[in-house]
């Protein structure tokens, strides 16, 4: 101990002597100069679940504080059959190949809804990984499958993370904290009971939920124009509170109306159709609608068209929906929609391809 004290005293005297050449130092300053340096070795803690939840909550909002919800709607998806089986073998039985070219587009939105015309349980595994969050099960193929098959398919779909929308019910999907209500109606058996039912059901949904999307299975197969019943029922749905109306079944694209500020897409055509190896028309499109929520009020923000082909090939159908990249093909779709919309009072004059 004495040796240690002697060394410390010698060190202090040496420092005092050195400092005297410039200026006098206090004892506290001398002691501070020889004190060991403290290194901060504090390790930052990982964020808590509450902090993570708060960050995710904040990320939902736009810079202006509003909430932006993007909804995509695509046409009929039918898997199965001889042609599909042959193509499936090339991918070792992995059904996911059908959405490989469109998956990125569907994952970029907040909600994608399509019309599923298939009663095979294995199809359920394709949907959620491919970016499809909701499917309507309202069509003649589902009716033919029977109640037991429909129930099994629905359980498989919902277990895989996709919402199923059957006729006569309000299906809900939470999107960025908002409840989106989806309704679906089958018109192929006639419209008599729907003139009263559709407005009643849509109004009931709108009274409870901020965004209501209505899907119809209607029209005549092969037709590029809606008939009078489609037009009347679509507008009734809007009058009752629908925020977006989409139709399927004709397997052909049909024009779009903007009625009272709401888009009525009479037919989105096919999305993935495996019943034909070489369909006469493989052109189609996805519609995208953006809703902006500000101070609890929902506004229809913007709308656009995403032209697609139901096949990545032009010589045959390989059952892989793909973005259309040729300007001439895109122009052909828009021209078709405009020409066939001439008889509609509220048909779109322009079809935007960008937001």
Image (cartoon, rainbow, N blue to C red):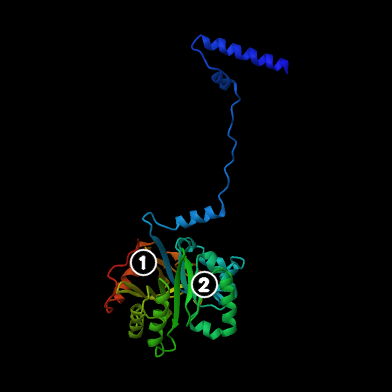
Label 1, secondary structure: give it: strand
Position of the C terminus, as image quadrant, is: bottom left
Q: Position of residue 23 (x, y in %)?
A: 49, 12
Number of numbered discs present? 2
* Mark 1 neighbour density, 10 Å: few (under 14) some (14–19) many (20 or more): few
The CA distance from mark 1 to mark 2 is: 25 Å
Give the residue number, with chain letter if any, for mark 2. Answer: 163
Give the vertical position of 15 relative to 291 (above or below): above
- What residue is shown at x 33% (from left), y 75% (from top)? 255
Q: Quadrant of residue 189?
A: bottom left
Q: Nearer the viewer, residue 104 or 200?
A: 200
Give the residue number, with chain letter if any, for mark 1. Answer: 297
Q: Nearer the viewer, mark 1 or mark 2?
A: 1
In the drawing, does residue 119 fall left or right of residue 109?
A: right
Q: Position of residue 192 (x, y in %)?
A: 39, 90
Q: Position of residue 196 (x, y in %)?
A: 38, 87
**Is residue 310 something one can see in this rendering?**
no
Position of the N terminus, as image quadrant, is: top right
* Outermost residue, front side: 27
**Is residue 213 something one can see in this rendering?**
yes
Q: Nearer the viewer, residue 2 or 294?
A: 2
- What residue is shown at x 37% (from left), y 67% (from top)? 298
Q: Quadrant of residue 301?
A: bottom left
In the drawing, does residue 159 fall left or right of residue 286?
A: right
Q: Are marks 1 and 2 in contact (CB under 8 Å)?
A: no
In the drawing, does residue 261 fall left or right of residue 191?
A: left
Q: Position of residue 39 (x, y in %)?
A: 59, 31
Q: Earlier in the sequence, mark 1 or mark 2?
A: 2
Q: Nearer the viewer, residue 103 or 32?
A: 32
- What residue is shown at x 34% (from left), y 67% (from top)? 300
- What residue is shown at x 41% (from left), y 64% (from top)? 70
Label 2, secondary structure: give it: strand
């Amino acid at each position: 101990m004495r040796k240690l004290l002697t060394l410390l005293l010698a060190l202090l005297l040496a420092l005092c002597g050195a400092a005297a050449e410039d200026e006098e130092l206090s004892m506290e300053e001398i002691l501070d100069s020889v004190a060991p340096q403290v290194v901060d070795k504090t390790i930052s803690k990982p964020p808590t679940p509450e902090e993570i939840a708060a960050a995710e909550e904040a990320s939902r909002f736009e810079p202006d504080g509003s909430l932006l919800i993007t909804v995509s709607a695509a046409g009929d998806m039918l898997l199965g059959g001889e042609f599909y089986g042959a193509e499936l073998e090339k991918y070792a039985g992995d059904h996911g190949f059908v959405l490989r070219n469109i998956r990125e587009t569907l994952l970029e939105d907040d909600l994608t809804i399509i019309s599923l015309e298939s009663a095979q349980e294995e199809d359920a595994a394709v949907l959620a990984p491919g970016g499809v969050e909701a499917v309507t099960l309202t069509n003649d193929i589902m009716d033919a499958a029977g109640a037991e098959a429909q129930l099994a398919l629905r359980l498989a779909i919902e277990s895989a993370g996709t919402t199923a929308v059957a006729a006569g019910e309000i299906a809900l999907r939470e999107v960025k904290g908002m409840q989106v209500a989806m309704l679906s109606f089958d018109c192929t058996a006639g419209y008599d009971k729907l003139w009263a039912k559709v407005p009643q059901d849509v109004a009931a949904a709108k009274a409870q939920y901020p965004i209501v999307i209505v899907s119809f299975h209607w029209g005549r197969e092969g037709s590029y124009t809606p008939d009078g019943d489609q037009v009347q029922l679509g507008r009734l749905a809007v009058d009752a509170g629908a925020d977006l109306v989409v139709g399927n079944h004709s397997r052909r694209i049909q024009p779009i109306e903007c009625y009272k500020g709401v888009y009525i897409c009479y037919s989105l055509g096919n999305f993935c159709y495996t019943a034909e190896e070489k369909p006469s028309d493989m052109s189609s499109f996805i519609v995208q609608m953006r809703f902006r929520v500000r101070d609890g009020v929902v506004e229809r923000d913007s709308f656009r068209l995403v032209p697609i082909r139901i096949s990545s090939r032009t010589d045959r159908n390989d059952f892989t929906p793909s973005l259309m990249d040729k300007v001439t093909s895109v122009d052909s779709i828009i021209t078709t929609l405009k020409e066939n919309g001439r008889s509609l009072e509220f048909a779109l004059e322009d079809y935007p391809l960008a937001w």
